[in-house]
Amino acid sequence: MVRPIIEVVRHGTSHHFRRHLWSRKVIMIKLVYCITKKAGLTDEEFFRYWKDIHGPIGARIPQLRRLVQSHRLIVPGDKHVPDYDGMAELWFDDVEALLAARQSPEWKASTENEANFVDHRKVAYFVSEEQIVLDRMEQNS
């Protein structure tokens, strides 16, 4: 399948998307959203709510191809406390699909539900395109 690559160009505070080049690779984009739990929640409450309540709400977003939650682990010997409690990855076919999804009632419901468990003063997000450097996932052991 031939798909255009979309270049994101920032002008001041707005973003414009420009098609350029042509590629035979199937390129998906993902929105990466780093989150911190709301004050007063235990880790157990936060992770359970995110997975069991919020996850199904987010999974209904139209044009979403994949939704991954990465829950923070505390590893013995780590010298620093992680800045975030988790990371969500929302996968879309392209920027247009992401922009359309953002206009949906399902996106609005998901965003509004975040107030129940996310500290919005401590979040980060970006839209990305993966550049795979190493992939041993298909190798047999």
Image (spheres, rainbow, N blue to C red):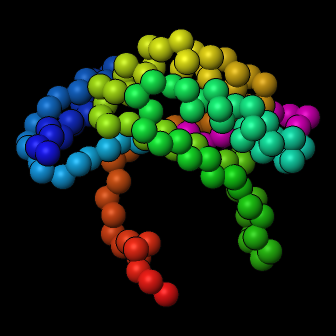
Tally the numbered discs.
0
Please name the residue shown 47% across and 14% down the image.
Answer: 104
Q: Residue furthest left?
A: 21
Q: Residue furthest front?
A: 140
- Left or right: 10 in relation to 116: left
Q: Is residue 36 visible?
A: no
- Left or right: 27 in relation to 137: left
- Left or right: 58 in relation to 31: right
Query: Relative to the observer, which residue lies in front, 86 or 139?
Result: 139
Q: Quadrant of the N terminus?
A: top left
Give the main secondary structure of the magenta stretch: loop
Magenta-drawn stretch contains 35 = yes
Please name the residue shown 69% across and 26% down the image.
Answer: 114
Q: Is residue 65 above or below residue 113?
A: below
Q: Is residue 85 visible?
A: yes
Q: Is residue 15 above or below residue 128?
A: above
Please name the residue shown 26% across and 47% down the image.
Answer: 27
Q: Residue furthest bottom?
A: 141
| Quadrant in the rendering for residue 2 | top left
- Left or right: 41 in relation to 35: right
Query: Relative to the observer, which residue lies in front, 91 or 76?
Result: 91
Q: Position of residue 10 (x, y in %)?
A: 29, 29
**Magenta stretch bounds:** 33-41
| Quadrant in the rendering for residue 41 | top right
| Quadrant in the rendering for residue 14 | top left
Q: Position of residue 68 (x, y in %)?
A: 56, 47
Magenta-drawn stretch contains 113 = no
Q: Position of residue 102 (x, y in %)?
A: 45, 20
